Amino acid sequence: MTEYVLEADHVSYRYDRKGPLVLNDVNMRIGKGVKTAILGANGAGKSTLFSVLNALYKPDEGTVLFNGSPVSYRHKNIIKMRSQVSILFQNPNDMLFRPNVEQDVAYGPENMKLPKDEIERRVDDALFAVGMSEFKKSPIMKLSYGQRKRITLAGVLAMEPQVLIMDEPTAGLDPQMAYEVMEIAEQLHRTGVTVIMSSHDTNLTYSWADEIHVMQKGKCVYSGAPEPFYSDKTSVYLSGLLCPSVFLMNQGLSSIGTVDTEPFPRAQTQISAKIAGNKSGKFGTLNILTVGPDADINELIAQHGLEGMSTGLYGLSARSAQHKSKAGIDFVYNGPENCTMKCIAGNDALLICDPVMVESAKASADFINGGGYGNISVNIING
């Protein structure tokens, strides 16, 4: 039985009494631990919905439930809830309150009345997670837009919430940082945080989300798995969205009999293997070396005889270990997919991986093997 962490029960909201409804009788249930995407065009009500779910706004009608109980809007209860349900707004300037990076990231933990040493640990961990450790003492005003967005994410991570709501988290970011943000979202999911993400980028969310909720003109018009929604072209068009490219490619090829419709691929490696596989029949081995944050990657590679193959990186402890050991890495971003593509081409590959990320790391290999599109051996090595 699904346990729901956040629920909107017939929720309506308007910004002023005589204004139009921004949210109109919204019903939505978000499962605990379910990777959830809220989709919709600009102005569909996604950001307002997030503010209602976070208790920043009180609905005019209906009820918001957190862990099965109606949200109380007493000041003490709201403060407690916001320490458990954190929101990352699209515009970083809406979330930066203090003059320098360290002070701003510490803002949330300080309001939680945590001990000083715990605050310092959280600040350091959060800054490392977003690649901003060297900017710890920097003035906020001197940071670029993308750097400010990283700092706001660090501030949210420092609170260690149960639920993280991310409003257009990759908007305004370069492609590498966008991959980093999605990797962080996956890591949080794997450590028990319920991650909710809004976007109008269906390619991004299709590769990640287990479940989608589609907003259209203040209403929730669809909730469920992505594929039934994207199969309804009229609903996609009316929602102001586009079908993901991988979904369209799979749909087109299945319509002419090249491939079966199911299983549905979610990543480029998966559709590539489904279409072409490897005509030679030879597939490489995906070696996944799990490491702690202080591991010497070069020493472990030599110890396990893993030299000479393309190497990728995935997860926080892997990035920490690479930073300390200065190991050479071919795929700093999108490591699992790049390494899997090497295996499709018949080459062995090595992925340096955080232990909690192993299931995510081998997802495409599992899809390829399970669908009969190839035979990629997965070798998990505990470093």
Image: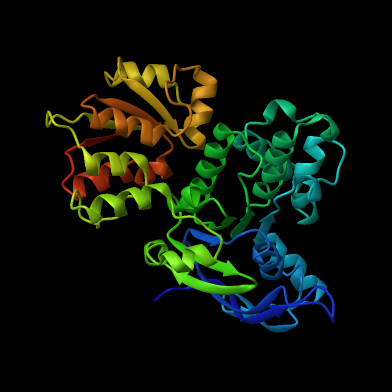
Residue at the image point whose x is 80% and y is 50% from the top: 94
Which residue is depicted at the point 44% across and 55% down? 243
Q: Which residue lies at the image location 68% right of the left edge and 47% below the top edge? A: 158
State the image coordinates of residue 222 (x, y, percent, origin top left).
49, 72
Quarter location, residue 99: top right
- Towards the viewer: 232 or 272: 232
Residue 348 visible: yes
Q: In which quarter of the image is the N terminus?
A: bottom left
Q: Which colour scheme is used?
A: rainbow
Question: Where's residue 216, x and y in %?
Answer: 59, 69
Q: Where is residue 92 in the image (x, y as percent from the top left)?
A: 75, 45
Q: Residue furthest left?
A: 281
Query: Which residue is painted at 71% across and 46% down in the image?
Result: 155
Given residues 91 and 180, the one toward you in this image is: 91
Lateral position of residue 83 relative to residue 237, left or right: right
Asked if residue 169 is positioned above or below residue 323 in the image, the reply reads below
Q: In this view, does 224 lie above or below 281?
A: below
Q: Where residue 136 appears, x then y in whole percent?
A: 75, 31
Asked whether residue 290 appears in the rendered view, the answer is no
Tell which of 365 and 296 is nearer to you: 365
**Number of numbered labels in the structure image:** 0
Quarter holding the C terminus is: top left
